[in-house]
Image (cartoon, helix red, strand yellow):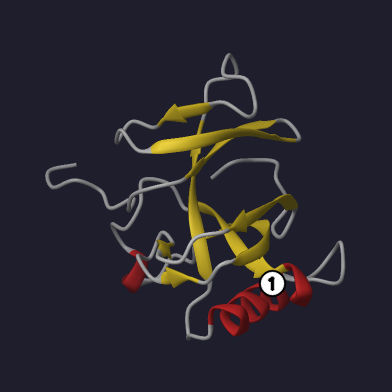
Amino acid sequence: MLKPLVTTLLIAALAFGLAGCRDEATLPVEAGTYTLRYAVQPAIKEHHGVSRYRDFVVLVPVSSDPALEQSPSEAIARSEEGARRGHPAVLALFPVQRAVRPGTITSNELGQPMLAISAGPAALGIVLEGHGEIPEGE
């Protein structure tokens, strides 16, 4: 996990302008503008092996995200409502070397394109394409 980030920290806003976008769970994301809030994937059986890191961002429709601060349960509920499904819309986060400038497109160890960002003391990459499933044998 990326420390010392606070759960539901507002990381960024992102506009999805195209139909057909998918999130980390490979579920569709409707076109629109979303806030990206930091979260940690629950350590439950259904999440075992789905990503190398438990860090991710929850996508919350801007129209449903009125407060700068909110509880993890509020952010998850608003994301689920916006996604119109029983799972929040999420994008994976991977660590990025500090030498990579924020705003740069880079790749993670799985070869997936990421947008490098800075969130307080952390250098992160928001996975733009691909699913973070851990390859067999790891």
- Which quadrant would residue 121 be assigned to in this image? top right
Q: Position of residue 79 (x, y in %)?
A: 61, 75
Q: Position of residue 42 (x, y in %)?
A: 49, 66
Report the front residue among 98 and 79.
79
Specify whether 49 is left or right of 32.
left
**Which SS class for mark 1?**
helix
Q: Position of residue 10 (x, y in %)?
A: 75, 54
Which quadrant does the C terminus fall into? top left
Which quadrant does the N terminus fall into? top right
Q: Residue at x 47, y 53 (%)?
A: 54
Specify whether 63 is left or right of 28.
right
Specify whether 59 is left or right of 112.
right
Of all residues shown, which one is farthest toward the left? 137
Of all residues shown, which one is farthest toward the top? 99
Number of marks drawn = 1
Residue with the mark numbered 1: 75
Q: Residue at x 44, y 62 (%)?
A: 23
Amino acid under disc 1: Ala
Q: Residue at x 80, y 69 (%)?
A: 70
Q: Residue at x 40, y 36 (%)?
A: 113
Report the front residue among 46 and 17.
17
Specify whether 113 is left or right of 17.
left
Q: Position of residue 16 (x, y in %)?
A: 57, 59
